[in-house]
Image (cartoon, rainbow, N blue to C red):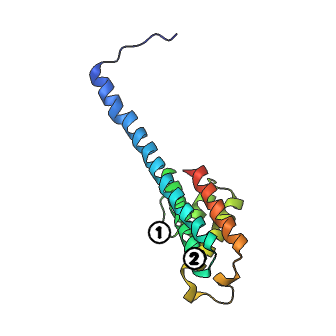
Amino acid sequence: MPIPIPIPLSTGISYRKTIISPLITRDLVKIVTLDIYNDMIEQAQNLRAINTEPLNRAACVLARIVIEDTLKKLCYDNGIALSSDKASVANDELKKKKIITKEQWRLNQVWLDIGNKAAHPETQQEDGFSSITEEKIDDMINSIKQFAKENL
């Protein structure tokens, strides 16, 4: 059994403020963030269940918000300064720093592209949102949910 070492009260308070408090705050932020992400993903899944084109678009936009925010938070957590607010820039930086694999980077880019097609239908050509299959939308939602869960 380890021998307890007395810590002066003033040192304990300082330790609590400088070490323990930020850790608790960081964990609390992660818990709240994951809860919000889970709600957004659940909303996306509920919209997909109705299976109409406008609601499928909305589901993809919700999922895109989750992946965009996850990528940016990963950059922040790893001390990566971003030159732009674009999620694709965050994705590129994470790949460059080897925080995510090349395969994950490609997958993230596909999900960002689908989310963009869903959010901006007026800018799309013949390969717009209508070319996205229902299976691909479901894969997108499930993959983003897993990616956020693993990386926050």
> Looking at the image, is mark 2 or mark 1 earlier in the sequence?
2
Q: As drawn, is 112 to the left or to the right of 22?
A: right
Q: Is residue 122 above or below residue 60?
A: below
**Residue carrying label 2:** 55
2 vs 1, front mark:
2
Q: Residue at x 28, y 21 (%)?
A: 9
Q: Secondary structure at mark 1?
A: loop
Q: Residue at x 69, y 85 (%)?
A: 127
**Residue carrying label 1:** 85
142 and 124: which is toward the camera: 142
Residue 27 shows which numbered tag?
A: none
Label 2 and label 1: CA atoms lie apart by 27 Å
Q: Residue at x 43, y 39 (%)?
A: 23
Image coordinates of residue 125 in percent, x first then y, are 64, 89
Image coordinates of residue 25 in percent, x first then y, are 39, 43
- Kindly identify the amino acid type of the residue bearing the numbered disc 2: Leu
Image coordinates of residue 1 in percent, x first then y, are 52, 10
State which quadrant residue 103 falls in: bottom right
Residue 85 in view here? yes
Q: As drawn, is 76 to the left or to the right of 99?
A: left
83 and 19: which is toward the camera: 19
